[in-house]
Image (cartoon, rainbow, N blue to C red):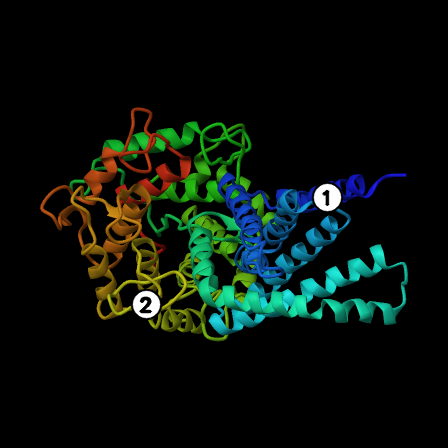
């Protein structure tokens, strides 16, 4: 007869196989996998650190909040892995698979809560959710004790077990409340920031999803009624554009798509970025063909895999840049994602992208949907003129502000008021090397600099004359990151040249912003 130790590991293997099979289907990036592993380790260590206080541990909070931000698959993975990892300290037993299940379920419930609330809950609702999650965990573990150890499978005996465990369950819930009050909102903000910076179709995803597991990473927006010239404009170094286009075309895969780096499998996310960069540089993406496949044909073939509003927005933007009308079903889905308050996902960056996607699809700025989105977006501006992806009150950043500024202008806002203040915020945060940082006082990088250039153009400013410190312009900074094969480094200290960085740099070098009408 198989022992409980072996049975636990069999169940563990099945649980992980099922969870990671689900997770694998969401195509998580290496960064998302690393974040999930880190959160699972943090949850496990939190349990170990408070071992001296029975049932007082931050594990449940970390699992629920992970699911709340990242989505179901990552939330389940964080919970189940944390359980088995921490039990290498506390001891494995027949209780291990039940703990894996209990925390996995809490991760899933966190994902459901995040989806229903648009991931915008204050400290008190989050605290209440964490407290209730502690009680739910107790119910599941009491049930496991009843069916595994009691030998008396009557409901009355289950009530006896539950009654004897009630003090521990209440202590667990109170501990969750205290931990959430202390660090809950801060952890949510940190995870939301991560989700907004990469593909979290977490979902990481994703998108985010959340949006699916993906929340959307900042995109280089480049589409217009006429293709831009690749010749030098306003002092912009045209060789960097020309060589960047050559590099992108060389990294195209046989299926027409692009991967995160040369030689990597195609991905709809990175293909969209490449299309935006090519269109900004004046290269018709429909004519970039490898083995009979273009990036546009690849994107259209992958529409069934899109998850969440972020994916829809990005793909519609890219199709608009290639002068391809998006499928009616995609536009209908995007319209259906708009909240009653006019926002998309109640997030600044997603609402800005929603406006840009609608404009790319030919929706006029005077439409009710865009006017409502623009009004909501303008109301999220911080007193310093900047924007935070999660809304008013969060720390302003270059990428978030640049996206919001472009969304406002694309939505018909005049180049004064909110737009002028946002433009001033960006210009005031230029670094001495001419580039722009992700957040104030940070080092310059190619992505934020490209975003800043796009926003300056949208605000009616001239990037080639932007010299806050009297040194280089952002165009010169970007050109300086190019390497011999035409690719672009993320920063002056980076040696990596991902495809998406080159694509985003092209939109800045070409001084292209968003889809303009007429």
Residue 321, horizontal then vertical, whole percent: 41, 48
Front in this rendered view, residue 40 or 271 = 40
Quick one: which residue is furthest to the front in this view? Answer: 52
Up-down relation of residue 132 to residue 431 (above or below)? below
Quarter of the image holding residue 250?
top left
Residue 516, horizontal then vertical, whole percent: 33, 57
Q: Neighbour class for label 2 at 10 Å: few (<14), some, many (≥20)?
A: some
At mark 1, the secondary structure is helix
Up-down relation of residue 396 to residue 452 (above or below)? below
Quarter of the image holding residue 161?
bottom right
Mark pair 2, 1: CA separation:
55 Å
Left or right position of 385 against 176: left
Residue 405, horizontal then vertical, whole percent: 30, 61
Residue 113, horizontal then vertical, whole percent: 59, 66
According to the picture, the residue beneath numbered tag 1 turns out to be: 12
Decide if residue 391 is in sight here.
yes
Dot 2 or dot 1: first in sequence order is: 1
Front in this rendered view, residue 143 or 461 = 143
Instruction: Quadrant for the N terminus, please.
Output: top right
* Callout in the foreground (2, 1): 1
Up-down relation of residue 86 to residue 459 (above or below)? above
What residue is drawn where x is 86% and y is 39%? 2
Front in this rendered view, residue 230 or 341 = 341
What residue is drawn where x is 39% and y is 66%? 391
Decide if residue 327 is in sight here.
no
According to the picture, the residue beneath numbered tag 2 turns out to be: 412
Q: Neighbour class for label 1 at 10 Å: few (<14), some, many (≥20)?
A: many
């Amino acid at each position: 007869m198989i022992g409980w130790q072996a049975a636990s590991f069999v169940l563990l293997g099945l649980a992980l196989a099922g969870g990671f099979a689900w997770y694998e289907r969401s195509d998580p990036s290496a960064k998302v996998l690393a974040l999930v592993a880190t959160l699972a380790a943090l949850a496990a260590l939190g349990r170990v650190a408070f071992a001296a206080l029975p049932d007082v541990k931050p594990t449940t909070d970390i699992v629920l909040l992970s699911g709340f931000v990242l989505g179901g698959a990552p939330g389940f993975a964080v919970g189940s892995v944390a359980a088995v990892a921490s039990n290498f300290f506390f001891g494995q037993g027949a209780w291990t698979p039940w703990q894996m299940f209990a925390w996995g379920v809490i991760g899933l419930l966190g994902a459901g809560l995040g989806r229903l609330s648009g991931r915008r809950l204050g400290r008190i609702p989050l605290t209440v959710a964490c407290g209730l999650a502690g009680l739910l965990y107790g119910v599941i573990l009491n049930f496991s004790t009843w069916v595994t150890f009691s030998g008396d499978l009557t409901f009355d005996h289950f009530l006896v077990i539950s009654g004897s465990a009630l003090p521990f369950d209440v202590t667990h819930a109170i501990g969750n409340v205290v931990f959430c009050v202390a660090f809950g909102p801060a952890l949510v903000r940190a995870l939301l920031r991560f989700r907004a910076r990469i593909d979290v179709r977490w979902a990481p995803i994703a998108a985010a999803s959340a949006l699916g597991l993906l929340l959307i990473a900042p995109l280089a927006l480049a589409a217009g009624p006429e293709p831009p010239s690749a010749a030098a404009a306003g002092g912009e170094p045209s060789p960097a554009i020309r060589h960047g286009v050559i590099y992108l075309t060389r990294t195209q895969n046989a299926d027409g798509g692009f991967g995160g780096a040369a030689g990597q499998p195609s991905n709809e996310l990175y293909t969209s970025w490449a299309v935006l960069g090519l269109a900004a540089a004046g290269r018709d993406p429909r004519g970039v063909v490898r083995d009979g496949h273009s990036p546009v044909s690849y994107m259209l073939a992958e529409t069934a895999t899109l998850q969440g509003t972020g994916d829809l927005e990005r793909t519609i933007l890219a199709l608009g840049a290639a002068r391809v009308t998006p499928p009616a079903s995609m536009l209908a889905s995007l319209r259906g994602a708009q909240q009653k308050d006019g926002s998309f996902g109640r997030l600044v960056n997603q609402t800005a992208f929603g406006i840009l996607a609608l404009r790319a699809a030919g929706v006029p700025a005077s439409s009710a949907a865009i006017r409502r989105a623009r009004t909501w977006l303008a109301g999220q501006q911080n007193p310093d003129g900047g924007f935070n992806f999660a809304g008013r009150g969060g720390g302003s950043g270059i990428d978030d502000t640049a996206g919001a500024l472009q969304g406002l202008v694309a939505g018909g806002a005049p180049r004064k008021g909110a737009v002028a203040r946002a433009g001033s915020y960006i210009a005031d945060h230029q670094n001495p090397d001419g580039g722009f940082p992700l957040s104030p006082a940070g080092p310059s990088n190619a992505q934020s600099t490209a975003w800043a250039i796009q926003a300056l153009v949208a605000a009616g400013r001239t990037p080639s004359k932007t010299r806050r410190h009297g040194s280089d312009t952002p165009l010169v900074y970007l050109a300086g990151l190019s390497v011999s094969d035409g690719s672009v480094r993320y920063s002056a200290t980076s040696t990596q040249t991902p495809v998406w960085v080159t694509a985003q740099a092209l939109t800045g070098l070409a001084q292209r912003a968003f889809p303009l009408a007429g």
